[in-house]
Amino acid sequence: MCNRFMHPLRVAVQWLFLFFTCSLGVEFYRFVLHCRGESAVFVPRPEGIEGFLPISALVSLRGWILSGEINPIHPAGLVIFLTIIGISFLLKRSFCSWLCPVGTLAELCWKVGFRLFRRNFRPPSWLDIALRGIKYLLLLFFLGSIMVLMAPGSVLSFISSDYNKIADIRMLDFFLHPSLLSLIIMGILVLLSFPVKNVFCRFLCPYGALLGIVSSCSPVKVTRNKSLCISCGVCSGTCPSYLPVMELERVHSPECLGCWRCIAHCPVHGALEMKLPGGRYAVPGLLFALLVVLLFWGGSVVGKVTGVWHTAIPLQEYVILSRDPAVRH
Ligand code: SF4
Ligand code: SF4
């Protein structure tokens, strides 16, 4: 079956998920307005907002390992974090290229940049390698600080701290009232995202670095059939991660986003496929797309069914903590 439809399908999934994420953000904003007495309308807190708290989720994971219990402060955050790890383990970094809203906006930027400049710019190899190392250093910092160096007592006290309880509100305030320095940094990143592909994801995102490492174990990988390949170079040219797909038999790189761009653009049917080990079984594109969406959605269903989803923080505590001047300024 032709895989050309995979590119528009992925873009459709990306944008649907971006709108879903924005709707969560609006719901959460309205919840916070109510807590602060700025709106009489009560909107329940969407638990999915905890997906934006990966550091809290990492501390939760450590707390779970230490105590054997999942803390009830941000349980959905941990469920979403583990779901994304699971998806990366099975289906490469498909979360980055199919679902992550930052990835969607980054892709929009470099596509606009391509239209503006008629090309995208890639740093020289030595700089590209050095810059890509930043996200691994950040990952090492977070993993080392939280999973190794943080004392067990500190883990448990962080989880139950006021700071962690309203980490979501702090994050909202950070984006609603950014400091001048944050605005400058975000502005530079956005400006660079037009000429250079995936600046934040490729160079700075420690989450992406973690998912890349996990995705190395993924059973499915882009696989080239040497006997069918006509060495046209389209796959290498369309890869947003600049992987030399045409020169590889199987793409093992942690930079592979599982985006299917190379497969969708390959002009020879069967020359490039997403295959299981051994190269005998190719995963149909539609099945891959369905799995990405269903696994992500399934994670939240499992969380809800097992009671690991809703926060135990009472509304009254949110009301008190959200009005704390230390949070607001
Ligand atoms: S796009 Fe297809 S045919 Fe062209 S080089 Fe890549 S695998 Fe070979
Ligand atoms: S190798 Fe193919 S699937 Fe992997 S990032 Fe490049 S274009 Fe996407």
Image (cartoon, rainbow, N blue to C red):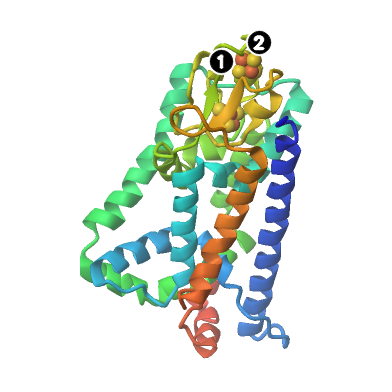
Q: For the point 71% across and 65% down, which residue is it? A: 23
Q: Nearer the viewer, residue 55 or 189?
A: 55
Is residue 87 rendered to the left or right of residue 20?
Answer: left
Compared with 260, 12 (above or below) is below
Q: For the residues labelled 1 and 2, say whether their Cβ atoms are less than 8 Å apart.
A: yes
- Amino acid type of the residue tagged 2 in the rendering: Cys
Mark 1 Cβ and ligand 1 under 8 Å apart = yes
Among numbered discs 1 and 2, the one appearing first in the sequence: 2
Q: Quadrant of the N terminus?
A: top right
| Picture coordinates of residue 93, whole percent (x, y) | 51, 41
| Picture coordinates of residue 319, whole percent (x, y) | 55, 86
Q: Which mark is residue 67?
A: none
Mark 2 Cβ and ligand 1 under 8 Å apart = yes
| Picture coordinates of residue 41, whole percent (x, y) | 73, 86
Q: Quadrant of residue 47?
A: bottom right
Q: Quadrant of ligand 1?
A: top right
Is residue 318 among what the camera can see?
yes
| Crowd tier of the residue under label 2, counting other residues whose Cα lies within 10 Å: few below 14, some 14–19, many 20 or above | few
Q: Quadrant of residue 278?
A: top left
How many numbered markers are drawn?
2
| Picture coordinates of residue 179, whole percent (x, y) | 57, 56
The residue identified by callout 1 is 246
Q: For the point 64% across and 23% down, which residue is it? A: 270
Q: For the point 44% across and 45% down, which residue is it? A: 89
The residue identified by callout 2 is 232
The alpha-carbon separation of the residues under discs 1 and 2 comes to 8 Å
| Crowd tier of the residue under label 1, counting other residues whose Cα lies within 10 Å: few below 14, some 14–19, many 20 or above | many
Compared with 227, 258 (above or below) is below
